[in-house]
Image: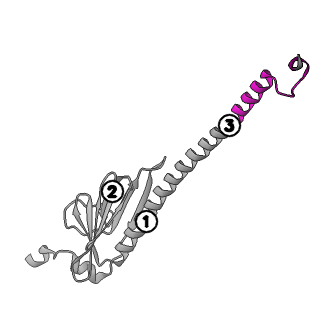
């Protein structure tokens, strides 16, 4: 009889269910916002990493070309930067998924998706091995629209005379 007359202050079952549903909604909203922010941050980080790789490749390629004495095509997708003593200083090998830069014992890998590469001399494409080049055109395809890089080498007259083969028609006359 004593238990029937005493009332203890407590929550009803319906009130507990309402609180549980509301806390579930709040926690799911927090988790969804965390997941959205996390995936956007990962996407942004990957995009920035690709841009950094591309910028580093462009800077290294431009610097090596400017400091070289002469540029020559090594293979179909490779080129060599020669020093003034006619030694290979830096070698570049271009693949569809990455680019390798080799300087003596040091090897650098750039993870850039090179879609198309063209070696040119005075505006005409060069395909023969060991031909001299003065322009490189790279098309990079990691972003929504293709990104094209043009890098030029300015030669002085002495290096062009040393690098080009002798004209055999003059010897015959």
Viewer-nearest residue: 42 or 5 = 5
Where is mark 1, residue-wise? 56
Q: Is residue 87 left or right of residue 155?
A: left
**Helix, strand or loop status at disc 3:** helix
Q: Quadrant of residue 83?
A: bottom left
3 or 2: mark nearer the eye: 3
**Helix, strand or loop status at disc 1:** helix
Where is mark 2, residue-wise? 117
| Residue in the image at 57% along x and 50% along y | 41
Assess disc 2: are there few (<14), some (14-19) or many (≥20) residues with their C-alpha within 10 Å of its C-alpha. some
Q: Is residue 101 left or right of residue 16?
A: left
Instruction: Please report whichever mark, 3 or 2, sits nearer to the chain's N-terminal start.
Output: 3
Magenta region, residue range: 3-29
Q: Is residue 173 visible?
A: no
Can you say whether 99 is above or below 88 in the image?
A: above
Assess disc 3: are there few (<14), some (14-19) or many (≥20) residues with their C-alpha within 10 Å of its C-alpha. few
Q: Quadrant of residue 39?
A: top right
Magenta span main SS: helix
Where is mark 3, residue-wise? 27
| Residue in the image at 19% along x and 63% along y | 129
> Does residue 15 show up magenta in the picture?
yes
Q: Position of residue 161 (x, y in %)?
A: 23, 80
1 or 2: mark nearer the eye: 1
Q: Is residue 161 left or right of residue 65?
A: left
| Residue in the image at 27% along x and 83% along y | 158
Viewer-nearest residue: 36 or 124 = 36
């Amino acid at each position: 009889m004593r238990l029937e007359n005493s009332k203890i202050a407590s929550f009803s079952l319906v009130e507990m269910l309402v609180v549980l549903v509301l806390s579930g909604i709040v926690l799911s909203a927090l988790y969804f916002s965390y997941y959205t922010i996390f995936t956007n941050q990962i996407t942004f980080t990957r995009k920035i990493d690709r841009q950094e790789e591309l910028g580093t490749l462009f800077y290294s390629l431009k610097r090596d070309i400017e400091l070289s004495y002469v540029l020559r095509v090594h293979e179909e997708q490779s080129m060599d930067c020669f020093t003034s003593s006619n030694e290979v200083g830096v070698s570049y090998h271009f693949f569809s998924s990455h680019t390798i830069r080799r300087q003596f014992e040091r090897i650098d890998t750039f993870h850039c998706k090179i879609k198309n590469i063209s070696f040119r001399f005075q505006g005409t494409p060069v395909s023969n091995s060991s031909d001299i080049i003065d322009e490189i055109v790279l098309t990079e395809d990691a972003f929504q629209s293709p990104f094209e890089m043009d890098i030029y080498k300015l030669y002085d007259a002495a290096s062009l005379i040393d690098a080009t083969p002798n004209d055999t028609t003059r010897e015959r006359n």
